[in-house]
Image (cartoon, rainbow, N blue to C red):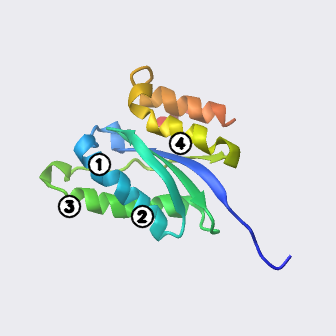
Amino acid sequence: MGHTCYVVYEHIVFSTKHRQKFLDKPIQAELFPYLAAAVRNQKCKCLIVGGEMDHVHMLVGKASMLPTPELVKEIKRTSSIWIKGKGPQFRGFYWQVGFGGFSVSYSNLDQVRQYILNQENHHREMSWEQEYRLLIEKNGIEFNEWFLD
């Protein structure tokens, strides 16, 4: 075989430090496209970005061998600098340490896309902590409370 075909889809989730509610609708309107561009700058494809005031969900297609921790580290680094430049109210902004990365099969991309689009309604019924715990358990990861720190 003379050519390598490679794409991995991941649902990536991370929150603000201590789940502080920095990400209101006006900043989301700018942040989500910024995060999508940051993903593209790393030679990956961003299918959708969504979230709530204290966390972000991204559906990413990785066509390169870039490790997910490096991708997320760079996205968080650049977006943190960008957010802090948006005004004094963001001076104390930080992303949490760590993230959740969950594989998504091609056949489930639309389901995950809809899940991300429906975050506002979803969080009327479930907290971020409950949602994250469910994602961890659904993906067969043994739950540990420090995942929520």
Quadrant housing residue 35: bottom left
- Residue 113 is marked as 4
> How far apart are the alpha carbons under marks 3 and 2?
16 Å
Q: Is residue 145 found left or right of 32 in the rendered image?
A: right
- Residue 38 is marked as 2
> What residue is shown at x 27% (from left), y 61% (from top)?
82
> How far apart are the alpha carbons under marks 3 and 4?
30 Å
Secondary-structure class at tag 2: helix
> How far apart are the alpha carbons under marks 1 and 3?
16 Å
- Residue 85 is marked as 3
Q: Residues within 10 Å of mark 3 (few under 14, many from 20)?
A: few
Query: Of the residues shown, which amino acid type is indicated by label 3?
Result: Gly
Question: Which is nearer the eye, 52 or 97?
Answer: 52
- Residue 90 is marked as none
List the single residue furthest toward the bottom. 2
> What residue is shown at x 28% (from left), y 53% (from top)?
30
> How far apart are the alpha carbons under marks 2 and 1?
15 Å
Q: Position of residue 2 (x, y in %)?
A: 82, 79
Q: Considering the image in quadrants, where does the N terminus appear?
A: bottom right
Q: Residues within 10 Å of mark 2 (few under 14, many from 20)?
A: many
- State if disc 3 and disc 1 touch (CB < 8 Å): no
- State if disc 4 and disc 3 touch (CB < 8 Å): no
Query: Of the residues shown, which amino acid type is indicated by label 2?
Result: Ala
Query: Of the residues shown, which amino acid type is indicated by label 1?
Result: Ala
Residue at which label 1 appears: 29
Quadrant housing residue 142: top right
